[in-house]
Image (spheres, rainbow, N blue to C red):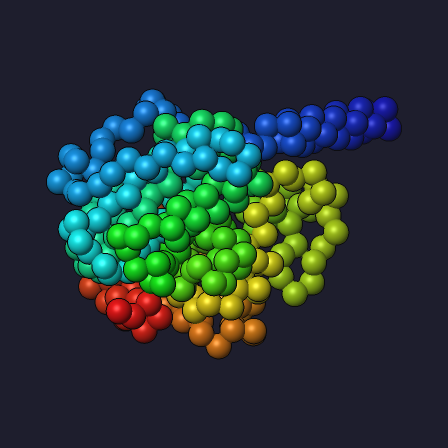
Amino acid sequence: MVTYMGALFYGVGGIVVAGVALLVAFQEKLVYVPVLPGLSKSYPITPARLNLIYEDVWLRSSDGVRLHSWFIKMFPECRGPTILFFQENAGNIAHRLEMVRIMIQRLNCNVFMLSYRGYGESDGSPSQQGIIKDAQAALDHLSQRTDIATSRIVVFGRSLGGAVGAVLTKNNPDKVSALILENTFTSILDMAGVLLPFLKWFIGGSGSTKSLKVLNFVVRSPWNTIDAIAEVKQPVLFLSGLLDEMVPPIHMKMLYAKAAARNSQCTFVEFPSGMHMDTWLSGGEVYWKTVMQFLEKHAPA
């Protein structure tokens, strides 16, 4: 019996160790998914398909990676707010075009859509430090344009895009007017424990009491949004879908609490039927009215 139990213990332990080793080795492929299953890396459509006025913009990040983006304008001389849009972790910017089309119509704004490195037509491979550089390149480009109101640049990020946007906004208090976060996580460390429950004993611990869990130190893209949001000084709008099936809504509440403790210009709005990807759709008129009021207050003409 002792021998059997010992063999079972070591066997299970070996499986766990092997599983953790694989997760550590292939973590980028779990965090970043530029190609959806059954689809190609290329864009299935362009803004032209939706009759949108746009230009292809090619950028260079500070480490030399060539990046592709779309700058979409409501009309050629539109001087409304410009939204710098950061997508989720899976697919590419073309998969967000329908939402952006409605955003432009409802908010009377321009939208700049960046393809992270390794996504769409951008070169390179995704990583946290790399994507932070990509986002900075996009903001620097917008800040130098003469055909927009550069004092009305607002960052919008959903899920992973919210983590990207929080870091960019924190680092650029003089270039970003405001930040909008939708269904964003506290950190990748915490999400690992949500998606793979057996890992919660080894990873995570965002919040008021940080846990020193062993796997926290080997994650290369931790995306600690909860730390970044605490240093954002600009106004922040939190849009939370209560039926989010990917990121537990408590993450958004934790982000808001962290930000509001130091920033009095924070607004938190819940959408009872909002899921991870469709809060903008299920939220209907209330969703767009909320965003419009936020822009009118914090990115006025």
Q: Residue at x 26, y 69 (%)?
A: 301
The image shows residue 181, relative to residue 116, as above or below, that is: below
Q: Is residue 4 left or right of residue 203?
A: right
Count of residue discs: 0
- Reply above or below: 68 against 39: below
Q: Picture coordinates of residue 43 (x, y %)?
A: 29, 29
Outermost left residue: 51
Residue nearest the viewer, comparing 222 with 281: 222
Q: Residue furthest bottom?
A: 264
On the image, the x and y values in percent for residue 65 come to 49, 31
Residue 18 visible in the shown view: yes
The location of residue 84, given as percent across then percent down, is 36, 51
Q: Nearer the viewer, residue 34 or 210?
A: 34
Residue 293: image quadrant is bottom left
Image quadrant where residue 91 sits? top left
| Residue situated furthest right in the rendering | 2
Residue 240 visible in the displayed image: no
Q: Residue at x 49, y 53 (%)?
A: 168
The residue at the point 44 percent across, 48 percent down is 140
Horizontal relation, residue 82 to residue 224: left or right: left
Q: Is residue 78 left or right of residue 153?
A: left
Q: Position of residue 87 (x, y in %)?
A: 38, 44
User: Of residues 122 and 294, which is closer to you in this image?
Assistant: 122
